[in-house]
Amino acid sequence: MTSLIIIFLVTGIISGFMAGLLGVGGGIIIVPISYFVLLYLDYSSDYAMHISIASSLGVICFTSISSIRSHIKLGNVNFSILRTWSPGIVLGSVLGSYGASLISGQILVNIFILLAFLIALNMAFQKDPIIISKDLPKFKLVNLVISFLIGFMSVLIGIGGGSFSVPTLTMFSKKIYEAVGTSAALGFFIAFPGAIILMLSGSNIDNLPPFSIGYLNLAIVLLISSTSIFTANLGAKVSVNVNKVTLRRIFSIFLLFTCISLIIEHYII
């Protein structure tokens, strides 16, 4: 039990710091670690990924608040983008989390592997952002579709959306610090409705871990959040003065190893 507590506390330290630093959302770290811990504790693989995703979203609710406060103080949050994209983000989160509750754990694992692999490739090889426009699209429907897809794909793998929203915002000529800060704020609009839907949709499932409300496990959320809320704040402050290209490449290696570990767990062992 002591080892498990330490694992989740350390997970919070790392995931919170990376969320504040790179705006990628700590969920990309929280989900696979929680998943492997639940498998180690002999919980069913049918629901382990659902629990990991829901609990990650719960953590992001807390982490994003801490990160948002720091980014607002630094002037990194674009409230105009926040107003434009929030409706689509919330809609995508609601439909994505409901869809996640209906599909099997194996499919969720495959989706995580695929999207995490694509995120890793983007981090490893994209040095300079691809610019497609000087600003966000003028048409509301286009913005709705873009933000919906970000919310939908993010909640399917339990992340705050920065892995999708940061590169998207830089494509529309937003500076990296503005993209990271705004993505941190958007992360709350992804995580909160997604966590609520997964809490409700898992309420009739038996044999879930202790302290679970639906698919969301309070023990995981509180342990990870107890450290991540502090390191997210630190990561946001440090983000102004670090070489993000090197960090992104290091992080991409971690993601690739995570994908390989999941493939070995499900298709080889």
Image (cartoon, rainbow, N blue to C red):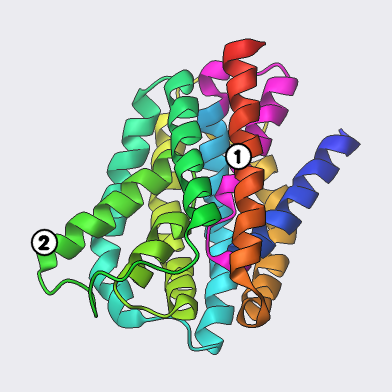
Residue at image coords 57%, 42%: 55
Q: Is residue 268 magenta?
A: no
SS of the residue under disc 1: helix
Q: For marks 1 and 2, give the one nearer the viewer.
A: 1
| Image position of 150 (left or right of 2) | left
Q: At which x and y percent is residue 105? A: 48, 22
Which mark is drawn over residue 101? none
Tag 2 secondary structure: helix
Decide: marks 1, 2 in contact (CB < 8 A)? no
What stretch of residues is rendered in magenta?
A: 20-48
Residue under pointer 1: 256
Residue drawn at x 70%, y 16% is 42
- Which residue is denoted by mark 2 in the rendering? 141
| Type of amino acid under label 2 | Leu
Residue 3: x and y in percent read 88, 36
Measured along the vertical axis of the image, is residue 88 above or below residue 74? above
Say few, some or many: other residues with alpha carbon within 10 Å of mark 2 (under 14 / 14 to 19 / 20 or more). Answer: few
84 lies left or right of 254 = left
Q: The N terminus appears in which quarter of the rendering? A: top right
Occupied quadrant, residue 185:
bottom left
Quarter of the figure with the C terminus? top right
